[in-house]
Amino acid sequence: MAVETALSILRSGDRAALAAAIVISGPHAFLREYVFDFVRRRMLRQGMKYRGFQVGGAEGFDGVLAELRESDLFAPLRVVGCRVLRSHRGGDEDGDDGAGGAGSARGGTGGGEAPLAEALETMRGPNALIVVYERDTAPAKIRRAVERDGLAINCPRAYDNQLTQFSEAFASARGLRLGPGVAELLAARHAGDLSAMANALAKAAIHRDPGATLSATDLDDPAAARIPELFDLAEAVSNGRAAAALVLLARAIAAGRDPFELLAVEIIPVMRRMMTAASMSAERQSAPQIAAALGMSPSSPLATRAIDGARRFGLARLTDAWRRVSQLDADFKNGKIKEREEALAGMLLELMVPPARA
């Protein structure tokens, strides 16, 4: 099976090899939608017409399959997009088919993925089928259906050292180039918020010709210059400003941010960077060596803050805090903790308040 990551597809641009059958899944919701739109637009530029479907609950794929089978006088070449919602009950997450599931109890095709898997397995063109699963992984039957001639695109969460690569890929998708230091500026400004990064580049592309090169000043309009609260939270954590971090945490949650998102997108990445810096500093590694291990340049603001935070907290406190944040992440995912805001605030206080001396 041709398996690609979202980053590899975006970086390849129009050179990426696409198949007639494509399945997109992964834990990063924004990347799933961005890659879907990226692939769809590329096929539209090739003269294909788009037909979109959405499947949820116990619905089957009859409409999708009928669109693939039937001829269309006005759209002889079509790309059919099918978004499978998280609520769809066509077989379990890892099961082979929908037999015995909630969907198979219905009449007709039901919610099972068997008919869709067969269509994916036999797709050879000239039409194309793109299936987007709002799940971390597509069902096993679907994954096997594209293992010969199809393409599976995984959309994982971005690592810290991939942020500049994503900024370059987003710019390339808009027909832009990034000047010196612009990729790192975007990574420092938006951290792991890829949607904000892509949105900033999309706004910059509105008044620029294809092929233009963006400089740092091109991103300094009032809307773009405002550092998001999420980045402020990460900066407050690395600087050890407990009061500011708690205020920003409360403000972000009041604005609609989910505590699990704050933990996964901001707190865990900044903790991981500081842990890496602290462990390498304990081995007497230099700042350029630490920045290289983080996948950043020595002048990167993210690398600088990680090194400063490592010196401020020390390896022992960061090790204890990393164990706590890892357990907190697991408890969030397992549903053991209901009061997530209070748990996050308590963890931040434990990290940033110095322990009392005996």
Image (cartoon, rainbow, N blue to C red):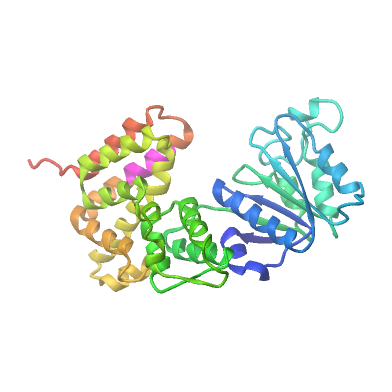
Residue 341 rendering spot, x and y as whole percentages:
35, 32
Instruction: Determine the residue positioned at 92% across, 51% down.
Output: 73
Residue 131 vertical placement versus 77 (above, below): above
Left or right for 340, reference 117: left
Task: Please identify the quadrant where the C terminus is shown.
Answer: top left
227, above or below 258, in the image: below
Q: How many marks?
A: 0
- In the shown orientation, is residue 90 left or right of residue 289? right
Give percent across and percent down for residue 65. Answer: 85, 43
Q: Residue 38 lies in what quarter of the image?
A: bottom right
With 104 as the anchor, is 172 left or right in this view? left
Residue 334 seen in the figure:
yes
Magenta residue check for 233 = no
Residue 324, magenta (yes or no): yes
Magenta segment main secondary structure: helix
Which residue ends up furthest to the left in the rendered image? 358
Q: Position of residue 338 (x, y in %)?
A: 41, 27
Relative image position of residue 266 (x, y in whole percent): 38, 48
Question: Closer to the camera, 3 or 61?
Answer: 61
Residue 28 visible to an observer of this rendering: no
Residue at x 36% of width, y 48% of height: 228
Q: Nearer the viewer, residue 73 or 104?
A: 73
Give the position of the N terminus as an image quadrant.
bottom right
- Which residues are the magenta region? 323-330
Query: In terms of depth relative to the viewer, which is nearer, 58 or 213?
Result: 213
Residue drawn at point x = 86 percent, y = 48 percent: 68
Identified at 59% across, 45% down, the residue is: 136
